[in-house]
Amino acid sequence: MLKSSFIKATEQFKSVMQKYLSEIAQSDTVFAQNFSKTSKNLESCFNYIFGEVKKTGLCAFDNQEIFDISVKYYTDDSIRIPTPVSC
């Protein structure tokens, strides 16, 4: 029997994303408000990124494409808590 697991972010990925989003929040007051929403968090952001990447069927992305997906997660209020992506 195969056991399904969820895609997880590496510590380096988490660190890079946290740094990127924090830097934007420091220089952009509107984004800072979005970034501090209690309904949004980094773990859900990663699940959103993984889900969006999976939808494309592609496996290689430019850094900026991933950064843009993360910003969209925080700024788009229609995005709810995403389901973790199984692999």
Image (spheres, rainbow, N blue to C red):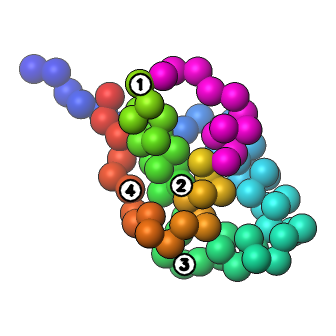
Q: Would residue 2 appear left or right of 32 to someone viewing this image?
A: left
Amino acid type of disc 1?
Gly
Q: CA distance from mark 3 to mark 2?
A: 13 Å
Which stretch did the figure color magenta? 58-68
Label 4 crowd (10 A; few <14 / some 14-19 / many >=20)? some
Q: Contact, CB < 8 Å: mark 1 with mark 3?
A: no
**Which residue is the site of mark 3?**
38
Identify which residue is drawn at 38% across, 56% down.
Answer: 82
Q: CA distance from mark 4 to mark 2?
A: 8 Å
Q: CA distance from mark 4 to mark 3?
A: 15 Å
Q: Is residue 24 above or below residue 58?
A: below
Q: Mark on residue 45?
A: 2
**Which residue is the site of mark 4?**
82
Label 4 or label 3, whichever comes before in sequence order: 3
Nearer to us of marks 4 and 1 is 1
Q: Mark on residue 57?
A: 1
Image coords of residue 34 (percent x, y): 65, 74
Nearer to us of marks 4 and 3 is 4
Q: Secondary structure at mark 2?
A: helix
Image coords of residue 26 (percent x, y): 87, 69
**Nearer to me, 53 or 87:** 53
Q: Secondary structure at mark 1?
A: loop
Q: Would residue 41 appear left or right of 24 to someone viewing this image?
A: left
Nearer to us of marks 1 and 2 is 1
